[in-house]
Image: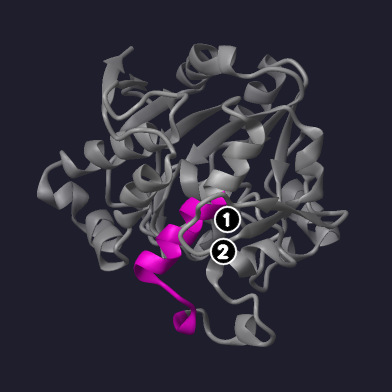
Amino acid sequence: MPTEQTKALVYYWKECSLPNLLQAVAKVQSNLSGKIAVKVHTGEPHGPNIIPPAWVKEVVNTLPQATAVECNVLYDSPRKHSATHREALLTNNYEIQVDIMDADGDTPLPVHNGFHLHEVAVGSHMLDYNSLLILTHFKGHAMGGFGGSLKNIAIGCASGRLGKKQVHGVDKPGAAEKSYLEWPMGPWFMEAMADSGKAILDFFQGKYACINVLRRMSVDCDCVGVGAAEPTTPDLGILASTDILAIDQAAIDLIYALPEHDKHDLVERIESRQGLRQLSAMAEIGLGTANYELKLM
């Protein structure tokens, strides 16, 4: 992993397409070995902005010993319980197996030198995998400001029963039943996501890679489903890296470089939630470097 004095390499394709996505996988594939978990955000039923399941299928099929993985959610949704979660996958045309990692419970991972958390409960099936491809639809997020590679694992690999409550700071009895508007937000939440992300990447011991797909970037997460606001920011392409901070930083930089009318809504969402704290928290906890080289492909 690069130090703060070195530059992480971030590959960039300006067009969002399946051929470019497969090229992105090939560029970072050497960092993956053994049984590979491909972490995707499968989204709510009929969600209009998710990475096309047909693309996910091709990514999984191009990698040896790869399986798409997800976890159940905390909020009221068909995806809250494994049986109805699987039905939602069929609704969204997932033709491949998706391992719901917390279908059989969760397991704690330690957080070393974290901001707030000492451990985070992840789906127990995660222990079955040797490396991790973080395949992310980059977009806005109601609480995090934006959802990039960090959010995809920090929330997405945390179990629905306990882990997501820990990361949201509502793991005390009755706390999760409050309106999410009463849950901890701002810097605390960004730092807790960094804690969770560190626990997960520590488990994989550097054997991970990230792809951010900057396509149909609504201000809302794919967990909003059909209710997500129509994107007002143009598609920007695909990024790939073996550094989680570098790839999320590069995505933010591409968005901020846009003309005001193209970036306004998404930047307002990011800054109103203090979402950029995700990046500085990752740097402080040792999750990569914000110093990167963008290599146009």
Q: Is residue 186 visible?
A: yes
Instruction: State whether residue 235 appears in this view.
Output: no
The answer to whether residue 89 is above or below residue 209 is: below
The residue closer to the viewer here, 132 or 202, is 202
Q: Nearer the viewer, residue 67 or 171?
A: 171
Q: Which residues are magenta?
A: 181-196
Q: Is residue 182 magenta?
A: yes
Viewer-side label of 2, 1? 2
Residue 295 falls in which quadrant of the image? Answer: top left
Q: Secondary structure at mark 1?
A: loop
Which residue is drawn at the image coordinates 49% and 66% (left, top)?
Answer: 227
Tell me: residue 283, above or below residue 179.
Answer: above
Task: Look at the picture and state if 252 lies above or below 156.
Answer: above
Question: Of marks 2 and 1, which one's residue comes earlier in the chain?
Answer: 1
Looking at the rendered image, the quarter that the N terminus falls into is top left
Label placed on residue 155: 1
In reply to whether residue 100 is colored magenta, the answer given is no
- Around disc 1, counting alpha carbons within 10 Å, would you say few (fewer than 14), some (14 to 19), or many (20 or more)? many
Amino acid at the residue labelled 1: Ile
Q: Nearer the viewer, residue 1 or 47?
A: 1
SS of the residue at dot 2?
helix
Q: Which color scheme does this rendered protein use?
A: one colour
- Residue under pointer 2: 167
Q: Residue furthest front?
A: 113
Could you tell me which residue is drawn at 78 percent across and 39 percent down?
127
- In-image side of 178 versus 286 (left or right): right
